[in-house]
Image (spheres, grey):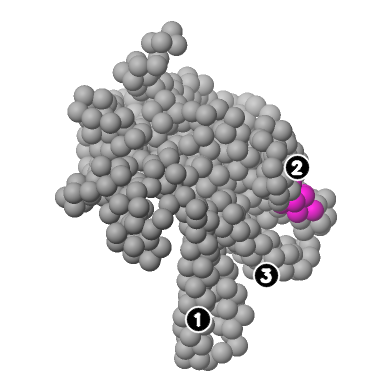
């Protein structure tokens, strides 16, 4: 069985268990689907479902091991001679990559092999900081936040590995490093200046740009799966900044600091222009449909809001605008999940709604209510929200699956593989 | 070539080689900063050469170990470090021209040296700070200390290499224009 087929079967085995648990399909239907993919034996089904566990444990193992190595270096580092420390960094990287290669391509253990590749990447990044430490280069900017250069170098060194070996977790790591390097660079460059607040917009714009880059990946079939990672990071980065701007404090601080209109540095407008080019590019490259039109419209609207806020920042009403943007985005993500039949979007969107409601509750009522009343009402409200969200989620998911299954298969009968609902994580 | 890099092992070797290149570039950058260091001569507060003789001598204090914010242009509030902008005097020693919170310069042909500061005295806006540059724990080794002149009234300085980040490394003592070896404790 090819790796892709094997992955598909494992995901399907995992997903049908979830569907059965949620009552979307019966136990009999679950067994029928599993039989259809040649996994009727309970032990075989169990083995298939363990694939995800192996991946998760491997990745956690790589992270823990890398953390342990860094801690060891941190505690014993100064006692070792320079040449030995340098050799240790290279040896660790080589060992991890060689192990990853052998496990993946000689022994077919691609999950653990992939985790060792991730370990190699983690050691590479640790090596950058350790080398800087060994050879007396500054690790921080102005004695505060870590120097952004090392994160940028980590991203540049990691990206080729992600694309060469099709690793989404390594790609996620690379993009995260890039985003962190931009944030630290902005802080180092503009901290404690009157431009500090306006350059925050660059982070949100970066998120929009990453999202557009994600769609540009759809132009090449082999890169489609990488596009999802960009879309995810782009969404998280943009919404994180939107979330920060839903509070009153940043806007009050802008007014208190006396920041005037037209004070944003050219960098803000340059970043908006670059993001706009990417948004237009992805729109031109994508197949024209309603979803593409709406999505591009939202991205363009976000950039327009960013430009307006950067130019005329002193207005407390922006908090309301960004609350609107945050909840509209959450609703949009839920709607998208529903239309696409993808439960992941529905869950993520509903999580955002819950976070937004909870935040506003704390923001508004913390100072108005006594502590006990705050927690009692908050707890009741949370339970009510959870109940409402779960009902909504179940309704949406049920409708999604009814739509997919309707007409193609009768309950209890074998479903041809090509007509079966695609597993959650294998959907486009 | 495309066929070669479609196989996993050559791909992995290429990627790892690229990462090694990036790591080595860090070393290369360090070498570059070492090669492009400036040399400055910093005068000590003491005028008695015996105070730097032998490993039993104490920490040295430079003229720039204490700075008066009101007397120097530049910033007057600092986050973690003070970058002292140094200019060369006609006698070859270097004096502070300005103080900065960051690695900014106010003048041409100057050198920035980074110091950790502690409050020394004065009032707000007229504060004085004591600065530590990490080059204070130095002495003339015992075998060379015998050649040091005695008595006070001498000009004692330390030749220091300063890199682009303001990090300094002491090289040797200069007493009345004569070089003396230097060791760090």
Query: What range of the chain is rendered magenta?
Result: A299-308
The earlier-in-sequence mark between 2 and 1 is: 2
User: Is A5 on the left or on the right of A154, as rendered?
Assistant: left
Specify the label residue A248 is tagged with. 3
The earlier-in-sequence mark between 1 and 3 is: 3
For the residues tagged 2 and 3, is the chain the same?
yes
Q: Nearer the viewer, residue B86 or B10?
A: B10
Q: Nearer the viewer, residue B148 or A420?
A: A420
Q: Looking at the picture, how far across and down is residue A227, in whole percent?
A: 53, 38
The answer to whether residue B177 is magenta is: no
Q: Do the residues labelled 2 and 3 touch (CB within 8 Å)?
A: no
Residue A274 picture quarter: top right
In this rendering, the count of numbered labels is 3
Q: Looking at the picture, how far across and down is residue A83, in whole percent?
A: 26, 25
Q: Quadrant of the N terminus of chain A?
A: top left
Q: Looking at the picture, how far across and down is residue B91, in whole percent?
A: 58, 26
Label 3 neighbour load within 10 Å: few <14, some 14-19, many 20+ = some
- Residue at point 49%, 36% (across, down): A226
Comparing marks 1 and 3, which lies closer to the viewer? 1
Say which element carries label 2.
helix
User: Is A177 on the left or on the right of A121, as rendered?
Assistant: right
Q: Mark 3 lies on which chain?
A: A
Residue ranking furthest to the left: A43
Label 2 neighbour load within 10 Å: few <14, some 14-19, many 20+ = many
Residue under label 1, please give it: A384
Residue under label 2, please give it: A269
- Residue at point 48%, 37% (across, down): A225
Say which element carries label 1.
helix
Q: How far apart are marks 2 and 3 (CA)?
A: 24 Å
């Amino acid at each position: 069985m090819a790796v892709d087929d094997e992955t598909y079967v494992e995901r399907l085995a995992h997903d049908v268990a979830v569907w059965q648990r949620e009552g979307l399909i019966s136990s009999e239907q679950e067994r029928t689907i599993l039989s259809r993919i040649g996994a009727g034996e309970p032990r075989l089904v169990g083995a298939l479902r363990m694939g995800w566990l192996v991946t998760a444990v491997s990745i956690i193992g790589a992270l823990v091991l890398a953390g342990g190595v860094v801690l060891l270096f941190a505690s014993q580092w100064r006692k070792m001679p320079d040449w030995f420390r340098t050799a240790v960094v290279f040896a660790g990287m080589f060992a991890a990559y060689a192990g990853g290669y052998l496990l993946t391509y000689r022994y077919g253990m691609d999950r653990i092999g992939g985790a060792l590749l991730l370990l190699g990447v983690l050691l590479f990044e640790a090596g950058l900081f350790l080398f800087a430490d060994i050879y007396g280069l500054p690790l921080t900017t102005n004695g505060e936040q870590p120097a952004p250069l090392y994160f940028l170098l980590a991203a540049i060194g990691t990206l080729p590995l992600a694309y060469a070996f099709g690793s989404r977790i390594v790609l996620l790591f690379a993009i995260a490093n890039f985003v962190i390097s931009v944030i630290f660079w902005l802080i180092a460059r503009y901290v404690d200046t009157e431009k500090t607040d306006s350059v925050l917009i660059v982070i949100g714009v970066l998120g929009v740009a990453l999202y557009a880059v994600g769609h540009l990946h759809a132009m090449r079939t082999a890169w489609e799966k990488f596009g999802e990672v960009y879309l995810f990071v782009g969404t998280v980065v943009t919404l994180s900044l939107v979330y920060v701007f839903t509070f009153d404090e940043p806007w009050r601080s802008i007014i208190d600091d006396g920041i005037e209109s037209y004070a944003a540095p050219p960098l803000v407008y340059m970043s908006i222009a670059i993001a706009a080019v990417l948004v237009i590019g992805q729109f031109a490259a994508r197949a024209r449909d309603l979803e593409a039109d709406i999505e591009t419209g939202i991205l363009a609207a976000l950039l327009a809001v960013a430009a307006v806020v950067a130019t005329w920042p002193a207005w407390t009403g922006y908090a309301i605008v960004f609350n609107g943007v945050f909840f509209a985005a959450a609703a949009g993500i839920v709607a998208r999940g529903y239309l696409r039949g993808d439960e992941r979007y529905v869950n993520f969107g509903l999580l955002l709604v819950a976070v937004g409601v909870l935040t506003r509750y704390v923001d508004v009522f913390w100072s108005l209510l006594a502590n006990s009343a705050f927690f009692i009402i908050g707890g009741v409200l949370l339970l009510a929200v959870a109940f409402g969200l779960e009902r909504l989620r179940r309704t949406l998911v049920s409708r999604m699956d009814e739509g997919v299954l309707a007409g193609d298969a009768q309950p209890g009968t074998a479903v041809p593989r090509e007509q079966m609902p695609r597993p959650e994580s294998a959907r486009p | 070539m495309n066929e070669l890099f479609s196989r996993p092992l050559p791909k992995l070797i290429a990627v790892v080689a690229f990462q090694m290149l990036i790591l080595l570039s860090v070393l290369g950058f360090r070498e570059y900063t070492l090669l492009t260091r400036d040399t400055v001569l910093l005068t000590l507060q003491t005028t008695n050469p015996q105070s730097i003789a032998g490993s039993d001598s104490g920490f040295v204090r430079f003229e720039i170990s204490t700075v008066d914010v009101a007397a120097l242009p530049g910033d007057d509030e600092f986050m973690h470090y003070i970058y002292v902008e140094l200019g060369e005097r006609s006698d070859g020693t270097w004096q502070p021209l300005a103080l900065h919170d960051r690695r900014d310069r106010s003048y041409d042909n100057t050198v920035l040296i980074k110091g950790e500061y502690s409050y020394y005295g004065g009032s707000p806006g007229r504060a004085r700070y004591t600065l530590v540059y990490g080059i204070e724990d130095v002495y003339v080794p015992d075998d060379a200390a015998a050649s040091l002149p005695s008595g006070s009234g001498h000009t004692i300085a330390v030749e220091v290499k300063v890199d682009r980040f303001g990090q300094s490394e002491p090289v040797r003592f200069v007493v009345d224009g004569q070089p003396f070896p230097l060791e760090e404790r």
